[in-house]
Each structure stands twice: as structure tokens, then as C-alpha cells.
Amino acid sequence: MSANDPTTGPCPCGRTDRRDKPIAYAMCCGRYLDDFDNTPAPDAESLMRSRYTAFVLERGAYLLATWDPARRPAAIEFEPGVKWLGLDIRSRSVLDAEHAEVEFVARQRSAATGAATRLHERSRFVREGERWYYLDGDLQLPLA
């Protein structure tokens, strides 16, 4: 593995421990991405973070598997050369035992244009059994 391999260092999702130290990929989102069948994300925020990490690592199968089957697209396409710059969880709300929302900002830079963009979304999640799924989200547009 290369020195730039995101799976050998801090988790791309940016989660930190109680001392504000970055948590390693293997102890954070790696558990869910690398052992999907046996280790579901325990809550909507963890699923949101693991889905961000799946975008960073271009793990389309994980993204599709964690999408609500009724709303899941047929495929995921990744823009070549995108560099993900970070994830900021703005808020999390548990609505009831089976529904939650997570508001986040994900930043990326396009290889094609060099432009940095921010995706600000309030995502909705549903729990079925022991597994959480991404339903959909509302993009939060910048104030004019």
C-alpha cells in the first residue's frame, strides 16, 4: 500500500476520539466498508460517514448496498480524479427508532476544472432491522 493510501491512516470521514485525535480507518468506517455483511453501521451518522468514505475510496458496491432499495440508482459513477477534501457533520437528529437525519457538508475538488465545490445536504435515513439505509436528501443552497 502506498503512503497516500487512505485505508492505512486516519479515516477519510474525519471522525475523532474524545481527545480530538483522528480515528484510524480500520477502527472507524473501515469496519463497515470492509465487513459489510457482518458489521452494519450502528446509526445514521456512522452510515453517513461511511458513505462519504466510500465516495473517497470509490466503493460503489457499498454505496449501492447502503441505499434504500426502493430509491437506489442502477449504478454509481465516479468523476475521474476528484479529490475529496473533507466532511463536516453539521447536525444529527434521531426522529424515532427507524428514522434519522444528518446534515453535512462534503468538500471536493474537480480534476477536470480544478474548482472546489461544497455539497451541503440534509440526508434522510431509515433503519430496517439492524441496518440503516440512505433514503434521500435535500440540498441546502447557499444564501444569496
Image (cartoon, rainbow, N blue to C red):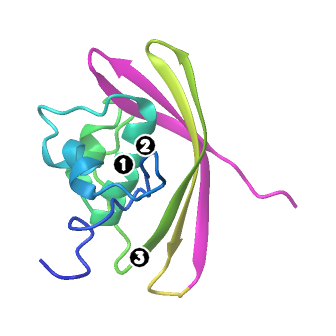
In the image, farthest residue toward the right? 144
Residue that appears at 49% across and 19% down: 99
Relative image position of residue 118 (x, y in whole percent): 61, 65
* Marks 3,1: beta carbons within 8 A: no
Task: Give the residue drawn at x 24%, y 39%.
Answer: 65
- Residue 68 image offset from top left, x and y in percent: 35, 30
Q: Dot 2, crowdedness within 10 Å: few (<14), some or many (≥20)?
A: many
Q: Calculate the distance from the C-alpha at mark 3 to the C-alpha at mark 1.
A: 16 Å
Task: First in sequence, mark 3 or 1: give its number.
Answer: 1
Residue 110 within the segment the image draws in magenta: no
Q: Tell me what residue is drawn at x 15 percent, y 49 percent.
A: 34
Q: Residues within 10 Å of mark 1 (few under 14, many from 20)?
A: many
Residue position marked by numbered label 3 in the rendering: 82
Q: Main secondary structure of the magenta part?
A: strand
Q: Are marks 2 and 1 in contact (CB under 8 Å)?
A: yes
Image: magenta residue range: 115-144
Say which element carries label 3: loop
Amino acid tagged 2? Met
Residue that carries the numbered disc 1 in the rendered image:
51
